[in-house]
RNA sequence: GCGAAAUUGGUGAAGUGGUUAACACGCCGGAUUGUGGCUCCGGUAUGCAUGGGUUCGAUUCCCAUAUUUCGCC
């Protein structure tokens, strides 16, 4: 079967909503956060550990797996789930984001047929099209595939964004035509920067094609302001159907997760928890902390007293700082466990808040602690 | 005991008779949002062993002292 979204509760005071996603690998509650496993691995963590943290869907990347090991290898292995030993749902990004960041000359390299770009591994000239991206994702056998979209920088002009919205619609249609995996859902992507009319047009036209779910793209890709990010969400959400999942691509930061939920987003993904972990930083309810800081040298308390993750239950800040400053790989691993669990737990808390119609209070309480750095 | 060389920040070190003493590492901070993992950006010697002297001016030249290293007895 294909993935199905079920809306169970609409929060009274905001657009926040509580629902469930039914997949071939179980049912999961939303709003939810997906950890990123670009190359068929959430860096340094095993599938069992992800399950223990109560992760649901994880994200893998079409571009990276296309280059290595190659989608035909994954297909021979029996699909992504078998290949990476993950018996939970997997969403694949279309490769759009990587491809556009690798295309040097936007005007020249992006054409109607597809995108020319250079492999980041060996510099080979490559060409990816809407059809190719979907075929690769069919072969990978992920549970949710993404349409191939153009992901322009937030700083792009109105005229550029308008063109890119139009092209993304045509690519979505082409991808839908060749999509051929009965077990795989396919999402359309809304673009249009921070312009209300473009977002509306993009959303309305994309929804007409009747996808299994809808993504809001083009955010968090060019250091755009939070205001613009929130506008992109606010201008898109009203035109998306109630009974389909909404996925905000590439977000986020704890504060952005709350803002996204309040604006009606169901699914998020972000590299932040694992990336900052590898760089020695961790989320806490009192703000982000940096283990390079000397003040943790003799701090023999847990990262967070009341966190239920493996790291917090077994290790001290002094030890974590030692691992980080000596560049030991266990450090990044332990912090990744905590950071992912932190965001997953935030989503649990927000689901409860939505059920009780108190998501705005939750935001108040969270921000008060998170922004007052100790 | 005699002779020679050396002495620059936490470390390894570059350098010059004349504005803010290079660089690297370390250290101290910060960043990071559909991941080109191990990255990027800041800060970090008011002083060049100590005391004299020469000079308009010395970390740079001279003398003494101290310490270190090497060689000889």
Image (cartoon, grey):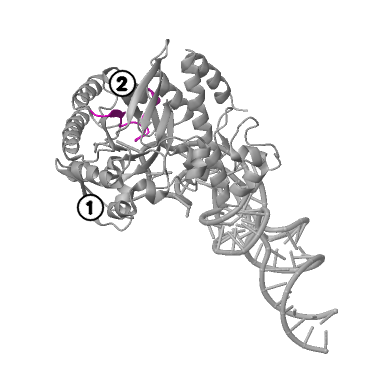
Position above or below: A255 against A338: above
> In the rendered structure, which segment of residues is drawn in magenta?
A211-228
Q: Which residue is drawn at 23% across and 20% down?
A: A200
Q: Is residue A52 magenta?
A: no
Cα gap from disc 1 to disc 2, whole angstroms: 38 Å
Q: Residue at x 48, y 38 (%)?
A: A273
Q: Name the residue under label 1.
A: A126
| Earlier sequence position, callout 1 versus callout 2 | 1
In the visual, does B65 lie left or right of B37? Answer: right
Q: Name the residue under label 2.
A: A243
Element class at badge 1? strand
Position above or below: A167 against B36: above
Q: Nearer the viewer, residue A195 or B58?
A: A195
Q: Name the quadrant containing residue A366.
A: top right
**Given this view, does label 1 or label 2 mark the residue nearer the observer?**
2
Q: Name the quadrant containing residue B3.
A: bottom right
Quadrant where the C terminus of chain A is found in the figure: top right
Q: Which residue is drawn at 67% across and 38% down?
A: A295
Predominant secondary structure in magenta?
loop
* Chain at tag 2: A
Q: Nearer the viewer, residue A166 or A59?
A: A59
Outermost top residue: A12
Q: Where is residue B5 in the image (x, y as percent from the top left)?
A: 67, 73
Same-chain status of marks 1 and 2: yes
Position above or below: B59 against A287: below
In the visual, does A148 lie left or right of A320? Answer: left
- Residue A188 seen: yes
**Few, some or many residues within 10 Å of mark 2 (<14, 14–19, 20+):** some
């Amino acid at each position: 079967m294909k993935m199905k979204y079920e809306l169970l509760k609409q929060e009274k005071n905001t657009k926040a909503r509580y629902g469930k996603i039914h997949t071939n690998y179980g049912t999961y509650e939303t709003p939810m956060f997906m950890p990123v496993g670009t190359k068929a691995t959430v860096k340094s963590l095993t599938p069992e550990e992800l399950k223990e943290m109560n992760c649901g869907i994880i994200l893998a990347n079409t571009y990276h797996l296309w280059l290595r090991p190659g989608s035909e290898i994954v297909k021979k292995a029996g699909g992504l789930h078998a290949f990476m030993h993950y018996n939970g749902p997997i969403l694949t990004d279309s490769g759009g984001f990587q491809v556009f960041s690798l295309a040097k000359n936007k005007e020249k390299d992006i054409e109607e047929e597809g995108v020319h770009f250079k492999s980041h591994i060996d510099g080979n000239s490559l060409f990816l099209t809407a059809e190719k991206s979907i075929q690769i994702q069919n072969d990978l056998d992920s549970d949710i595939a993404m349409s191939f979209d153009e992901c322009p920088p937030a700083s792009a002009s109105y005229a550029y964004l308008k063109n890119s919205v139009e092209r993304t619609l045509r690519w979505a249609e082409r991808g839908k035509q060749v999509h051929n995996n009965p077990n795989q859902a396919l999402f359309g992507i809304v673009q249009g920067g921070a312009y209300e009319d473009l977002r509306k047009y993009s959303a309305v036209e994309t929804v007409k094609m009747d996808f299994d779910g809808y993504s809001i793209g083009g955010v968090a890709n060019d250091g755009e302001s939070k205001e613009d990010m929130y506008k992109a969400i606010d201008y898109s959400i009203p035109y998306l159907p109630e009974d389909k999942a909404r996925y905000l691509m590439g977000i986020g930061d704890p504060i952005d997760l709350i803002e996204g939920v309040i604006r009606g987003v169901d699914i998020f993904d972000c590299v932040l928890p694992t990336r900052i972990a590898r760089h020695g930083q961790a989320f806490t309810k009192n703000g982000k902390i940096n283990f390079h800081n000397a003040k943790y040298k003799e701090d023999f308390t847990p990262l967070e007293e009341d966190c239920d993750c493996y790291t917090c239950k077994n290790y001290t800040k002094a030890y974590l700082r030692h691992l980080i400053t000596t560049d030991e790989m266990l450090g990044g691993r332990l912090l990744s466990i905590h950071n992912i669990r932190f965001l997953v737990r935030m989503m649990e808390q927000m689901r409860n808040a939505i059920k009780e119609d108190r998501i705005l209070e939750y935001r108040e309480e969270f921000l008060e602690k998170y922004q007052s750095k100790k």
